Amino acid sequence: MDGAQGLLRDPDAGLGQAATVPGETQEPRGLVSIILPTYNEREVIAETIEAILGAVAAPVEVIVVDDDSPDETWRVVEAMQDPRVKVVRRPGTRGLASAINRGLIESRGELVGWMDADRSMPPSTLPLLIERVKEHDIAIGSRYVPGGRDDRPAFRVFASRLINRLATIVLGSGILDYDSGFIVLHRRVLDQVTLMPTGYGSYFMEFLYACRRKGLSVCEIPYTFSERVVGVSKSAPNLWQFLTNGMGYLTRLVVARLRKID
């Protein structure tokens, strides 16, 4: 069944160490939770968090789920000493989807979202996503609707567009940016659809497809996806990685299409 149970079975429960700055214990009405999965983002994490806190007018919490970064990204977050910011350190555990799943478990907001921490996704788009969620169940930042743009190197843009084209052929549902990874949704969505805590981009495609099959509304908001300004991308493909990952994506897309939705 695609229900909230998937959020309760945390694959790394008991492995991580949560460090929380003391703050209010009661959940503010209208709280927005933004999850940032991180690995070696020391140079940009504080700037990203500050930009999120400055962009979102509603009560907001930022949850950083760090896979025990060698550059000690988690220490930078702890040092901010902001009651709106929480860091969960996961020694011995890595994985984008499982980090987001852990963040969902830790989150308290009526609205929940996640995005990259490397400044490739602009926090200034968050208010637009939050506004559109008033009319829809889910809002995603999209590079491929009119007004959106992908400013990365040509091969990475080609790879992303090809994967999205493949997802559209296999899954349909009218979504143009299936592997966006930039999202805000109502918490009630998580009562109906489970986020599979494995994989890199395919988890997002599976999640959106399951949402559409459940009859949930998804809207796409244009934004410009930029190449990171510091550090090295963890997803920049070479030809072999592209072919290998492509086969993995195709397999998961086909399985998602055939999977029974309760």
Image (cartoon, rainbow, N blue to C red):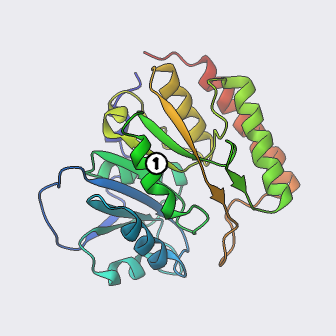
**Apparent side of residue 136 relative to residue 107 in the rendered image (left or right):** right
Can I make out residue 30 in this image?
A: yes
Q: Nearer the viewer, residue 228 or 69?
A: 228
Q: Is residue 135 left or right of residue 259?
A: left
Left-right relation of 26 to 157: left
Q: Is residue 156 above or below residue 131?
A: below
Q: Residue at x 37, y 27 (%)?
A: 192
Identify the amino acid type marked 1: Leu
Residue 74, horizontal then vertical, whole percent: 41, 75
Q: Position of residue 125 (x, y in %)?
A: 51, 57
Is residue 11 in sight in this rendering?
no
Q: Quadrant of the C terminus?
A: top left
Image quadrant where residue 150 sits: bottom right
Q: Secondary structure at mark 1?
A: helix
Decide which of 58, 4 is in the foreground and name it: 58
Q: Residue furthest front?
A: 147
Q: Is residue 103 above or below residue 62?
A: above
Of all residues, the one furthest to the right in this rendering is: 239
Q: Position of residue 30 (x, y in %)?
A: 24, 50
Q: Residue at x 41, y 33 (%)?
A: 137
Q: Which quadrant holds residue 9?
A: top left
Q: How many marks can you see?
A: 1
Quadrant assignment, res 40: bottom right
The residue identified by callout 1 is 129
What is the x, y in percent for residue 239?
Answer: 88, 53
Q: Identify which residue, 244 or 114, lies in the foreground.
A: 114
* Label 1 CA crowd tier, 10 Å (few <14, some 14–19, many 20+): many
Residue at the image point whose x is 69% and y is 43% from the top: 146
At x 27% / y 76%, what residue is drawn? 82
Q: Quadrant of the N terminus?
A: top left
